[in-house]
Every structure is written in structure tokens, then in C-alpha cells.
Amino acid sequence: MEENNARNFIDAFIIEDLSEGQRCEGMQIHTRFPPEPNGYLHIGHCKALTIDFGTAEHFGGICNLRMDDTNPAKEDTEFVDAIQEDIHWLGFDWGDRFFYGSDYFEQTYEYAIELIKKGLAYVCELTPEQFREYRGDINRPAVSPWRDRPIEENLDLFQRMRNGEFEEGKYTLRAKIDLASGNFNMRDPVIYRIRYIEHHRQGTKWCIFPMYDFAHPIQDALEGITHSLCSLEYEDHRPLYDWVVNNVSIPYHKPRQIEFARLGINYTVMSKRKLRKLVEEGFVSGWDDPRMPTLCGLRRRGYTAPSIRTFCEKIGVSKVPSTVDWALLESCLRDDLNANARRVMAVLEPVKLTITNYPEGQSEMLTVENNPLKPEDGTREVSFSRNLWIEAEDFMEVPAPKYKRMHPGFEVRLKGAYLVTCTGCVKDENGKVVEILAEYDPESRGGDPADGRKVKGATIHWVDANTAADAEVRLYDYLFSDPEPDGPDKDFLEHLNPQSLTVLEGCKVEAYLATIPMPEKGKSSEGFQFMRQGYFVLDNKDAAPGKLVFNRAVALKDSKKK
């Protein structure tokens, strides 16, 4: 790392801290990612995750993973496991530096005792209603009748709080700072409260729990974190963060908190509470529904780790909140899959094509490139016969103006195969086209006529009806129809997009796709470009041997209006 290699303002702060005579001179940069295990990571967390791990990586430092499990109401080991899986999937690792906030409960309790003994904390018995009433305003200081409670009495009450002698809400422990502070976070904030609830790791051992603003700086300091990188809503909490680490006797370097703007992205919601509501009330099939912004949902849909990391790099690090267009994330995925995905043929709305002059019972193998952008991916064989499937939209009996696909008397290319000329069609009793008839030019194998004539028709994709595999294909759109479903005075549920999922059954895919390995549940699937259709992956939950289920990750082009 060159001394002046600052990619953003966070890097600039760290370079300053590392310079001669400054707070981190000669130290190894040490960050942490502290998710609360009360839900699954989503695309919004990726910004913080990549900043925490990426900053440490950039400076040759280390990054801890710490589960912020100091609030046990919604926390669960299911989320702990999922968070670790998602971080590893993105390509980051914490080595042996995996911690729980609850690991520090005893030490945090002892630091609270220390503050009481120093006269810097007291037991308060204001009710929540009184707390709000006595909070004051910008011109009026807050009030607590219990602020001058004797130290010995505070120590006794706090011990009895831990012993479970009082009901919830009877007492809190508050830091004794400044009731007149213009920063309301400093007006003697609550640092402990009573909660009778089972903790996912500690069980019922504890009935008092530290507040985040008290526990977090202590945890950072105990782990030797040099820079505590967090989102912008904690900027007003920084004075309290500094107050805590400066007033407890942690024999370690004091960490520095630096804030950055959260990631906002349109056509979705980022609140865990709202995402949980979507799951629990059945608006989506689960946390891993491919329409969800969760990493497990994006992975199931077909998003790749490199595309998400590229997205985070492109949006950068800022102090100014902004909303990013989801189309940018799609563009990052499209670029990654375009470079790496194998090209295959799949017909989503099939209609039969019969090449009447191709010998019955005969078939041949055509050699096609797996990916023209990656010659090292080699080639594969695709079967061709008299009976094919093509897209229903690739035929019109009475063509519209400038229609370049199949219609009577018009010649088109079959991708990688032959030139064919439509000679008519067969309809059922309702007038629906059920079969298209055509003749092929035997001298045009590969798609080029022997006589060099120009072909005005389009190139259309197909699959051999004799060898094709059946598949279910799921097409996804934005989960919400409103780009700002979480806006002021809006009920986000009223803006759910009824067309966010379209399921196509009876699709036909080339035989090769029936031979690819089934994805492991929860793991990434290989991406394929379905020619002219988009990029698709096998669903990592519902696909099984003999049951092909493909999810469209992204279309070939951005079709949304700018």
C-alpha cells in the first residue's frame, strides 16, 4: 500500500492516523463487521461489509466478524450461520477472529460497575413515560430525580437488577454525562435495561442487557479495533462512543469511529423489520426468495459474488446519503455473466417446427462454442433433426411491417445450423398455430448459403424436439412497482408488484442442460446465457434430477425506462 493511495475519505483518515507521530503509527489496521443476527444479510449490508473487510485488506490489516447479539429479542443461530455463509460467498474471511458480543457480557458488566464507582453511572427508576416527559428539549435540560443517588445504593440496586429481583422496566442504569447537552444522546443515556428473555447463546443466565451504545465501543476496544467503521446514523452517537472508551479502564488502544452513508437502492426495502414482514406474512416464499434483496435471495436468483463486489466498488464511499438505481447492480451482473456464462439454447414458449425436406429419422451433431468470449471453454455437440422447437413469437402468419423472423415465403437462419424458408403452418380447431412448416437449404450448414446470397431474415434459436429436456422457467421483475416503496407516508405493502414473478412451464431446453450438476442447496449455481432471452441459473432450492427449474438472473439488456 502506497502512502498516498487513498481511495476514499476513510482511507485518507487512516493514512493520516498511520503517519509519523499519529495515533496509529506502527500499528496494524484492525476493523470489524458487527451484524446483528436477527435476519439475513441484504444488499445494503454489502456496502458496510466490503468497506470493513476491504479497508483492512487494502492496508494489509485484519477484520473481525462479531455477532452483535446484545439484544436477544429476534436473534437466532439460523441467522448466525447464514451470515457466515454469505460473507464467505462474497470472498471475505475473518480467520480465527470470530466473536459474539455476548462473549463480553461479564466484562461489560464489570465496566458498568466501574462507572458507578467513579460516580459516572446511576440506577434510575423513571418509567418510559416519565423518561420521555423529563427528556427536555433544545432549550430545556433533561431531568432525573435519581441522578444523585449514593454510589453504594447504585451498586446494590445494580447487583439486584442482575439477580432478577425487579420486574422489567422498574430500573435502568444510566451514564452520568450531561443532562443539558445539545446532543440528546449524551443526556444521561440508558446503558443497561432489564429483560427477561432467553438469549440464543447465554440462555437465561442474564436478565440485564447492555445497550448497543455502551456495549459496542467496549467490544471494539477489547478486540483492539483501530477503526470502527459504521453507517452515518451513528455520527451523533460518536461523542458517546468516545466517552465510553475514555472512561472505562480498557488497557488497549482507543478505537476511532468513522461514519459513511448507507446504501439506498430503489424498487426495494432494506429494513429487516419490513423484510421479515414480507417473509412471515407470505408475500414472498422466504428469506431466499429470488425477489428479495437478501444475499441468499440474490445468490439463488443468479447474482454472482464478483458482480456484487463490483457494484459496491462502483457506488463508492460517501458521506452523503443517496439512492442507487437497481439497474446498476443488474449491469454489473450482466457484465460478469456476459464474460463468463456459457451460451445455450432454450425455448420458453415453444411451438413445433417441422423441416419437411429433412430426411425423417435422420439427425446430426453440430459443434457450437460454449462461450465465444472464452475460447478456453471449448465446444460442445448439439443435435439437429427434422423436428425442432422454436419460440412462438418467432413466427407470424401475417407479418407486421419490418418483421424479420419466420413467416410464409421468408428465409431465416437457425442459429449454428441451416437456412430455412417457411412454407406454411398448421392450426388447431381454435385457429391457434400448433406447427410451422419449413424447408431447409442443405448447402447452408453453419448458417451461410453456398451461393453467397444475402439473407434478410433474423437468426433465431431452436432446440431439437427429439432430445430436448423439459424445464420450468421463472422470470423475475422488481418486487415493488414504486421506485420508492419505503417513502414518507407510504405503506410499502401497497406497492408490491403483482407481476414480480412469472412462471413458465413446458419450456424446452437443449439436452446438455439436463446433464449439468444439480446445485447444492444454498450454494451458487453456474450461470448460462439463454440466447436472446437473458442469463439464467438452476434454482438452488427447487431444481432436482429430472426436474429442471431455471431462474432468470437478468435480461440481456436493461429494458427499464431511464
Image (cartoon, rainbow, N blue to C red):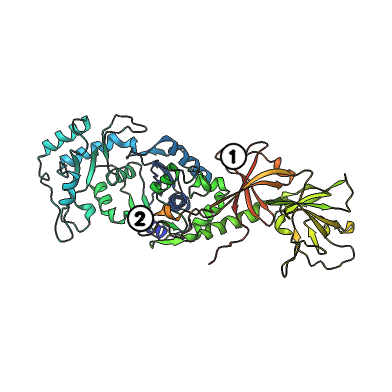
Task: Say whether residue 477 is left or right of residue 102.
Answer: right
Q: Quadrant of residue 220?
A: top left
Point out residue 523 in the picture as x, y percentages from the top left corner: 56, 41
Point out residue 522 in the picture as x, y percentages from the top left corner: 54, 40
Q: Nearer the viewer, mark 1 or mark 2?
A: 1
The crowd level at tag 1 (other Cα within 10 Å; few <14, some 14-19, many 20+) is few
Which amino acid, by three-letter code, is at mark 1?
Answer: Asp
Q: Nearer the viewer, residue 499 or 262?
A: 499
In three-dimensional space, the C-alpha distance between marks 1 and 2, rounded to whole angstroms, equals: 43 Å
* Mark 1 / mark 2, whichever is N-terminal: 2
Which amino acid, by three-letter code, is at mark 2?
Answer: Ile
Task: Say whether residue 24 is left or right of residue 314.
Answer: left
Could you tell me which residue is drawn at 81 percent across and 64 percent down? Answer: 410
Could you tell me which residue is drawn at 10 percent across and 44 percent down? Answer: 148
User: Can residue 6 be seen at all in this image of the molecule?
Assistant: no
As helix, strand or loop, the secondary structure at mark 2 comes to strand
Residue position for label 1: 542
User: Can residue 410 be seen at all in this image of the molecule?
Assistant: yes
Q: How many marks?
A: 2
**Placement of 115 over or under 54, stated as above or below:** above
Point out residue 141 in the picture as x, y percentages from the top left corner: 14, 56
Q: Which mark is residue 258?
A: 2
Farthest bottom residue in view = 401
As helix, strand or loop, the secondary structure at mark 1 comes to loop
Point out residue 477 in the picture as x, y percentages from the top left corner: 54, 54
The crowd level at tag 2 (other Cα within 10 Å; few <14, some 14-19, many 20+) is some
Task: Say whether residue 13 is left or right of residue 95.
Answer: left
